[in-house]
Image (cartoon, helix red, strand yellow):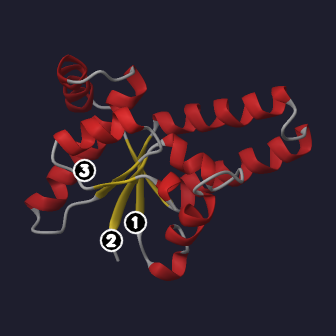
Amino acid sequence: MATFYADSSVLVKRHVQEVGSEFVEVLCDPVLGHEIVTSQVSIVEVISALNRRRREGSITATDYALLRDDFLSLCHSAYRLVSVTEPVLLQARLLLERHSLRAYDALHLASALEVNLRLTGAGLPSLTFLAADNRLLGAATAEGLPVVDPNDF
């Protein structure tokens, strides 16, 4: 069992078939017992991504509703959601000053760093940061996190 932090680009792959989807599906298989952690902001980002696909016509309105409901169910049952707290916001602001990141990406990385600090402080292995964004992966690497891009699989 390992802990993985998944940003929204990774979580979308679990619901919409694209490069890296198979990797994410295998990683999230409950039989493996991995813990999948993400920020609360993923809820807004994934719903936005699914809605964009609906508006563009790559999924139907019915498919959108099913995918949305499945995703929200997983948020309550399978993912550990990290709250956007004052320490996470402060860390995100500092990350924006060190790296060329978008605001939500900084929140994802700050959330991952917060969880990783708790894990390593308890003598547990570091989490692995998952994203499909090279700039975000570069910042995570610079901050000392092991990273994986599902698009590589």
Is residue 76 something one can see in this rendering?
Answer: yes
Residue 35 location (% of width, % of height): 40, 66
Quickly name the residue at label 2.
2
Query: Mark 2 or mark 1: which comes first in sequence?
Result: 2
Amino acid found under the numbered disc labelled 2: Ala
**Residue shown at the point (30%, 58%) measured from the top left:** 128
Q: Is residue 1 left or right of residue 27?
A: left
**Residue shown at the point (26%, 42%) measured from the top left:** 140
**Residue shown at the point (57%, 56%) measured from the top left:** 20
Residue that lies at the very extreme toward the front in this rendered image: 152
Q: Which secondary structure, mark 1?
A: strand
Query: Mark 1 or mark 3: which comes first in sequence?
Result: 1
- Circles 2 and 1: CB atoms closer than 8 Å: yes
Quickly name the residue at label 3.
115
**Which quadrant: the N terminus?**
bottom left
Quickly name the residue at label 1.
35
Amino acid found under the numbered disc labelled 1: Glu
